[in-house]
């Protein structure tokens, strides 16, 4: 068996993101041939793709791509470890896919995976990266905002890693300062919905039922329950709807009030944090 140069092991790990022992074994099997070792790791990775389907891809990054000031796409691409997330190949894949999303505007993730990018499907690109990097890699979600004025804010929770939080904000008219403020607020405060009117009926019904049960358990008079529940629902709106949240830079006004004072309307937003709903 050929002796293995540890410098080659390190270089192979950097190129493929495979484990140290896997790199050492591949170089031994390839009798020191670096390119052959790369191919062996890719072959091994391809064989292991199915085994990785049950593993959790809870790391990764959020990527953004703009088309001027009026459209942008946001993508969450997941992997299993932060080692892969900070790798060049993984980040390049994310950049290619998010640009492709903005180009073709797919309706959902399955449609995106079936679409052609550079002569092969997006799913094929993921499978190849999966095999080369040795981890489960998947597209969790994406969003495209188009029209009006669209701005983004990307936040790194660790300076050594790519952005883990990404926000798109859509205004009706251009205002870069307001868009930045609202995007940063959204990143920090994690609203779930734009406004009370956009909360799905089933979500609201569930919250209202919970508040009603809570109020009854507290022994409140029956005649007062409806009013108390309404108050608690309004409090829930202030926690979870963007326009009703207290603005982080001035908590005496809501985000909606801050926007209107500056002559703009917030039309939509998207907020992704890696590994969270």
Image (cartoon, helix red, strand yellow):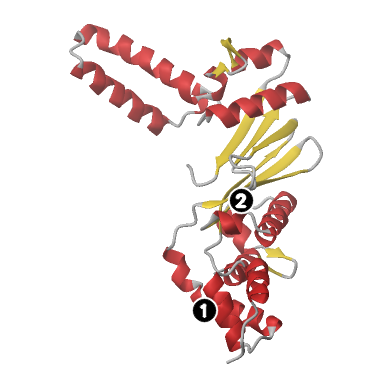
Q: Is residue 86 left or right of residue 80?
A: right
Q: Residue furthest right?
A: 68
Can you give x and y, in whole percent of width and height, for residue 105 in the image? 68, 50
* SS for callout 2: loop
Mark 1 lies on residue: 47
Q: Residue 58 or 269: which is nearer the viewer?
A: 58
Question: Residue 69 sits in which quadrant?
Answer: top right
State the residue at coordinates (32%, 15%). Answer: 229
Residue 18, compared with residue 92, is above or below; it is: below
Q: Residue 243 or 188: which is nearer the viewer?
A: 188
Can you give x and y, in whole percent of width and height, for residue 80 in the image? 51, 58
* SS for callout 1: helix
The disc at residue 161 is: none
Which is more foreground, mark 2 or mark 1?
A: 1
Please rate how many residues cluster around mark 2, counting C-alpha atoms within 10 Å: few if below 14, some from 14 to 19, many from 20.
few
Mark 2 lies on residue: 107
Locate the N terminus by quadrant.
bottom right
Residue 71, compared with residue 180, is above or below; it is: below
Can you give x and y, in whole percent of width and height, for residue 38 in the image? 65, 78
> Which comes sooner in the sequence, label 2 or label 1?
1
Determine whether label 2 and label 1 are within 8 Å by CB: no
State the residue at coordinates (44%, 62%). Answer: 55
State the residue at coordinates (55%, 41%). Answer: 273
Viewer can see residue 43: no
Can you give x and y, in whole percent of width and height, for residue 141 in the image? 56, 49
Residue 242, compared with residue 16, is above or below; it is: above
Question: Residue 44 sits in which quadrant?
Answer: bottom right
């Amino acid at each position: 068996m050929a002796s293995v140069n540890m410098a080659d092991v390190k270089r192979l790990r950097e190129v493929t993101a495979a484990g140290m022992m896997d790199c050492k074994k591949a170089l031994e099997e390839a009798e020191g041939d670096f390119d052959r070792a790369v191919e062996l790791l890719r072959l091994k990775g391809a064989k292991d793709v199915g085994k990785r389907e049950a593993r959790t891809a809870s790391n990764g990054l959020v990527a953004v791509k703009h088309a001027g000031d009026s459209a942008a796409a946001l993508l969450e691409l997941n992997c299993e470890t932060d080692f892969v997330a900070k790798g060049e190949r993984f980040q390049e894949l994310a950049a290619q896919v998010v640009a492709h999303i903005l180009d073709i505007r797919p309706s959902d993730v399955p449609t995106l995976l079936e679409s052609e990018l550079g002569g092969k499907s997006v799913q094929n690109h993921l499978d190849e990266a999966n095999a080369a990097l040795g981890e489960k890699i998947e597209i969790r979600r994406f969003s495209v905002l188009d029209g009006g004025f669209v701005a983004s804010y990307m936040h790194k929770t660790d300076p050594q890693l790519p952005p883990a939080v990404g926000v798109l904000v859509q205004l009706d008219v251009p205002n870069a300062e307001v868009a930045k403020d609202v995007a940063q607020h959204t990143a920090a405060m994690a609203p779930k919905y734009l406004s009370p009117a956009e909360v799905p009926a089933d979500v609201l019904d569930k919250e209202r039922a919970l508040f009603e049960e809570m109020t009854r358990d507290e022994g409140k008079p029956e005649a007062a329950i409806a009013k108390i529940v309404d108050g608690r629902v309004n409090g829930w709106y202030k926690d979870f709807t963007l326009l009703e949240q207290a603005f982080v830079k001035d908590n005496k006004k809501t985000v909606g009030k801050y926007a209107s004072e500056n002559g703009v309307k917030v039309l939509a937003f998207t907020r992704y944090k890696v590994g969270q709903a």
